[in-house]
Amino acid sequence: MPRRFPLICALVGLLACGDDDGAPAGALDASIEAAADGVGVGTPFFGRCDYTNAFAMSAECREYAGTWTREQAEADCAAVFLGASGELAEGPCATDMAVGRCIVGDTAADGYVTVSMGDASACSGARTGCEGFAGGTFEPSDVCGSSCEASGPIGEPFVQPFVECRDAIDGEPAGGTDGQVCTPTIISGSTEPGRRFADYADCSVVRRQRPYYAEAVEVENDPEDPRLGDESYMQELAWLREEAEASACICCHTTTETPEGAALWNTEAGDLWIDTLSNEALAMFAGFTDSGGFGFLPTEENNGFDRSQTGLPTTDRARLVAFMTRELERRGVSPEVAAELEPFAPFFRDLIEFVPEPCDDGLGIDEDGVLQWTGGGARYIYVLEADSASPGTPPNWDEPEGTLWLISVPPDAQAMSCGAAYGELPDGAVQRIPASGSAPALVSGETYYLHVQRDVVQPITRCTFVAP
């Protein structure tokens, strides 16, 4: 089956991938009646999975056809969005209020079409999620129109990382920075060892840097579990919890510091809270699978915590890896097998490694030096050297070497409309690169890379153009 990116769809506020007339594409043109005649185990199935997008809290639908069988559709629908189940039914998705459709893979085989509902404000997010991350083809409905006008904030725009310094809370020693505790407020950040991140930084900001959703994982707390009597194991588990809660992980993976409950793994799920982590999560924590594309701070800027090689920020990488290896082996997973597990959210690495192709006609830059893109209002506009790496996540991937000009708008400002002139700041925009002075002149006949983002990690146009 094709790769699916429900988390990415949530990241970009994906509210739609369906058309406005209900006519499915390709193999989906088969009639409901014809498909229904062959429904059964091992036989083709034409139907849909209706579910709720846990982030947008809106109805979505996935259509199955091609070589999908009822058994396959049932299995997919049982965990269609972040492990949550939908309702399987025959026939196509409803398309009232659909803003477009996203066709992923070969719908005559094991591909599918995703349909969701929304208004014009959802159009650019739908296109980004479909084309940029799911690798699908987006076909907008009439409600999207050109979808290129400036707009106010859609959802909660990304807040760039910053350092916040606070006095130590009662009962704790003075902080290490002139008596204060200084904490980088970013999803990969950590406060001082032995403290809780939520006491020294604003978790609501962190949750705007990654999507948060409440998804409880039920675990059995067996009082006879031999680990409870293993003093060494329990000491290491207590240390691991302290490491996790000193990091921004606490903002989404605890009960007490989240608005609606922990998202999957939960450090407050009992003495053996480690059981809420999947094998894939353990492998990522230990660095057996890659998570570097998530972004990370230098250790010296992160209160001694390092996340460059492990999924969890840590003050002792060898100790973390040793414990995770022990836990994986207890579950019957060797380091070799762990390294082959599916990495979590590989799209962050895909962002960095994306190689742009030449711009389609009408995109890039025109004779008047005006940058043209598609996909809607933009919060970040890059012009880079042609061979530059693509921008990724803050704090270390979002300003790649070779960036000639980078402008953005703050979270509370209106997005920029298509048609910003190179080197000129639209209303409300700020120039980040170069830090001072004018944008470097483009050389006629030279090739450059235009990278436009609806918001951080939400590219809407990525292509190369030749300067006029």
Image: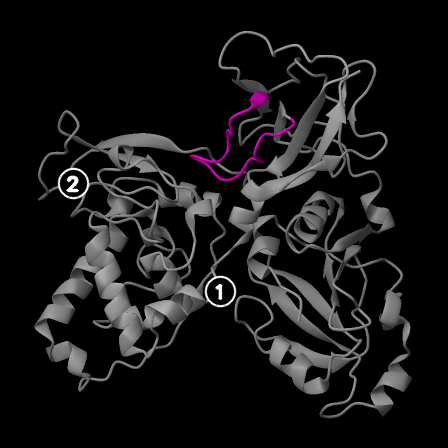
Decide if residue 466 is on the left or right side of residue 270.
right
Q: Residue at x 33, y 61 (%)?
A: 255
Distance Cα–Cα, label 1 vs label 2: 40 Å
Residue 354 in the image: x percent, y percent? 61, 42
* Image quadrant containing the C terminus: top right
Which contiguous range is marked in magenta? 386-405
User: Crowding at label 2, few (<14), some or many (≥20) Cα neighbours within 10 Å?
Assistant: some
- Image coords of residue 277 (percent x, y): 35, 68
Q: Is 440 in front, or is 36?
A: 440
Q: Answer with left or right where residue 321 lies relative to residue 2.
A: left
Residue of label 1: 342
Upstream in sequence: badge 1 or badge 2: 2
Coordinates of residue 398 in the picture (x, y in percent) = 50, 33
Looking at the image, which is closer to me, 19 or 66?
66
| Residue tagged 2 | 169
Which amino acid type is marked by label 2? Ile
Task: Choose between 160 and 303: the one closer to the eye.
Answer: 303
Q: Look at 41% across and 33% down and name the residue there.
A: 161
- State the quadrant of the N terminus: bottom right
Q: In the rendered view, would you say 367 is above or below 250? A: above
User: Residue 65: which numbered mark, if any?
Assistant: none
Identify residue type, mark 1. Glu
